[in-house]
Amino acid sequence: MTVPELMTQVLTDTTATGPDALVARSVYLVQHGTRLAGSPQIFRNCYVMVRCETAFGVCAVDIGEVDNNVIDLSGSTIAELLRHPLLPIRVAALDAYLGATAPHREDPRARRVELPTGTPDERAIARDTAIADLLHIQPGHRVALIGVVNPLVAAIRDRGGECLPCDLNLTQTHWGDPVEKDMHRVIEHADMVLATGMTIGNGTFDEIMQACRRRDIPLTIYAQTAAAVARAFLGRGVTSLSAEHVPLSQMSADASPIYLYEAAE
């Protein structure tokens, strides 16, 4: 199954909880920058968010990729948004639908981990430590990190792994390591892949899954965005998953949950 196939499957649901019956009460466009302590890098983040019932669907986009008129989509049905010409709108709607019909908090497969009240750095380190533990890294393992987050680079190295960083928007890590732009190059040399949920919104997720299947290596997704979409592939291309929902960890100083999943052996 691919992400487009999942969208098509969802659109066939004509029940009272199907996408024609559920409404996106609010559609948001949110932008922020983050610069962690001691780092010269500013991470510029932009998200489309769709509110549906008790869930927020989230899709990361490049700044300027979606204009402010997206908020006028508020009040559309989920089905209408799943047919929108822009992929990020479709992904945010799909994430909202899957999160509303099967919340992470109610999923028996999920292990809930509470991120502590704290500073942006403290919360980022706690989150990325939990994510890195999903990888079961052994000394010398090469980890392709697709979507560079500096605390994740550190967490991989702390466990004896070799990080192979890949990102479309960064040229180097906090420590000056060069960052590859071609994901296929790092996947070909990796023992495992750790990829951001942003890959679902930019259309590369299915390629990454296919490459990992071909090489028979595990794929872990760390998903602040499209977390419920990534969960749909658990055990079907995704080996493990860290899922967040709104408020995302960087949007709150208070304790908040992340949900960790591992596919059955």
Image: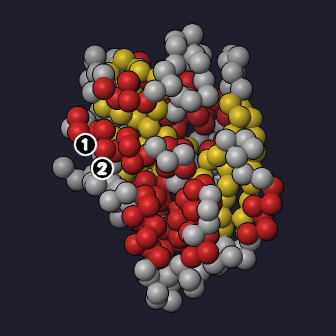
Q: Is residue 134 above or below residue 230?
A: above
Mark 1 touches mark 2? (CB < 8 Å): yes
Say which residue label 1 marks.
Answer: 213
Say which residue label 2 marks.
Answer: 237
Residue occupying the point 54% across, 46% down: 202
Residue 54 at x, y percent in the picture: 60, 72
| In-front residue for pair 25/200 | 200
Residue occupying the point 72% across, 41% down: 63
- The residue carrying pointer 2 sits among few (fewer than 14), some (14 to 19) or many (20 or more) residues within 10 Å by Cα, namely many
Q: Amino acid at mark 1?
A: Arg
Left or right: where 148 falls relative to 63: left
Q: Is residue 36 above or below residue 197?
A: above
Residue 97 at x, y percent in the picture: 53, 70
Query: Quarter of the image containing the N terminus?
Result: bottom left
Left or right: where 79 falls relative to 204: right
Alpha carbon of mark 1 to alpha carbon of mark 2: how far?
Answer: 7 Å
**Secondary element at image label 2:** loop
Q: Amino acid at mark 2?
A: Gly
**Outermost residue to the top:** 176
